[in-house]
Image (cartoon, rainbow, N blue to C red):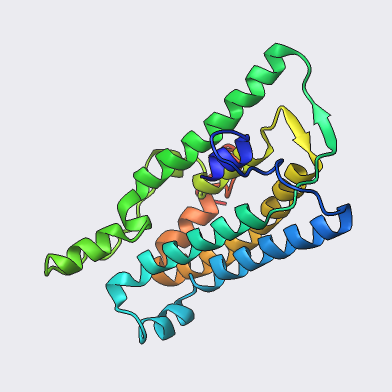
């Protein structure tokens, strides 16, 4: 759904469609929608919240409930998003447009592949509920850094950034979405990595020291 919303195809409401309500109103509404999503997305993922939340819902359902609430807020964002149709830039050359569209699809491919590299079904809470219904206890997640995770610590977020900015025609509304979400990603990563250090200890500290966060730069020597 985010792919179609940002790509302006296959769905009735996209980032550039819908009634306009004035520039200031649109900016305020759109930023508020993004802020609500950011607070929920990072807040519900914190261990302290999970500890409280699992007093209300079963622990095996915690992740799937988190994903469901995140999805509902995304649908709210899509539904209530106010377009800002002014064009900031537009690639005129057919080859350049094709390259940018290719980057858009590459970004989403990186996101999808990265989820499967670490365990797609666990990420969306399906594995936990399956183990619960089958009467087995889900194994503890082991620290791994498969393929793309050997080049950057957060390839999913890198894929999102590529997809958000790869627009052959960049409207003001799309630019607002890309800028706000890109600013949020490093903040969200700081919260996530604090939890990862707590969960995996020195293994993650070494990984963080040796592997770039988002840009696949050359690895730092182990002695540094």
Looking at the image, can residue 219 be seen? no
Looking at the image, can residue 76 be seen? yes
Residue 18 in the image: above or below residue 131: above
Query: Is 68 situated left or right of 7 in this image?
Result: left
Query: Is 106 situated left or right of 38 in this image?
Result: left
Residue 18 % position (x, y): 71, 45
Residue 101 % position (x, y): 62, 25
Residue 204 vs residue 130, the one in the foreground: 130
Residue 20 % position (x, y): 80, 49
Query: Is 153 situated left or right of 200 in this image?
Result: right
Quadrant of the rendered image containing residue 40: bottom right
Quadrant of the rendered image containing residue 50: bottom left
Residue 62 in the image: above or below residue 21: below
What residue sits 43% from the left and 40% below the top? 112
Residue 149 vs residue 167, the one in the foreground: 167
What residue sits 73% from the left and 43% below the top? 174
What residue sits 67% from the left and 60% below the top? 34
Residue 122 vs residue 216, the one in the foreground: 122
What residue sits 36% from the left and 44% below the top? 117
């Amino acid at each position: 759904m985010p792919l179609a919303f940002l790509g302006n195809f296959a769905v009735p409401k996209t980032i550039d469609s819908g009634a306009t309500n004035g520039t200031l109103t649109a900016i305020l509404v759109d930023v508020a929608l993004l802020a609500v999503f950011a607070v929920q997305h990072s807040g519900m993922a914190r261990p302290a919240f999970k500890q409280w939340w699992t007093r209300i819902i079963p622990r095996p359902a915690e992740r799937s409930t988190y994903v469901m609430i995140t999805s509902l807020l995304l649908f709210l964002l899509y539904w209530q998003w106010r377009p800002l149709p002014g064009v900031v830039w537009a690639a005129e050359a057919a080859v350049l447009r094709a390259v940018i569209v290719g980057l858009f699809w590459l970004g989403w491919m990186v996101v999808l592949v990265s989820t499967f590299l670490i365990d797609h079904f666990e990420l969306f809470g399906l594995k936990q509920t399956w183990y619960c219904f089958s009467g087995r206890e889900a194994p503890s997640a082991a620290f791994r850094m498969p393929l793309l995770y050997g080049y950057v610590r957060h390839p999913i977020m890198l894929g999102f950034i590529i997809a958000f900015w790869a627009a052959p025609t960049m409207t003001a509304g799309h630019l607002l979405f890309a800028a706000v979400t890109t600013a949020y990603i490093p903040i969200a990563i700081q919260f996530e990595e604090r939890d990862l250090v707590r969960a995996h200890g020195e293994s993650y500290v070494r990984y963080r020291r040796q592997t770039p966060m988002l840009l696949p730069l050359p690895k730092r020597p182990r002695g540094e």
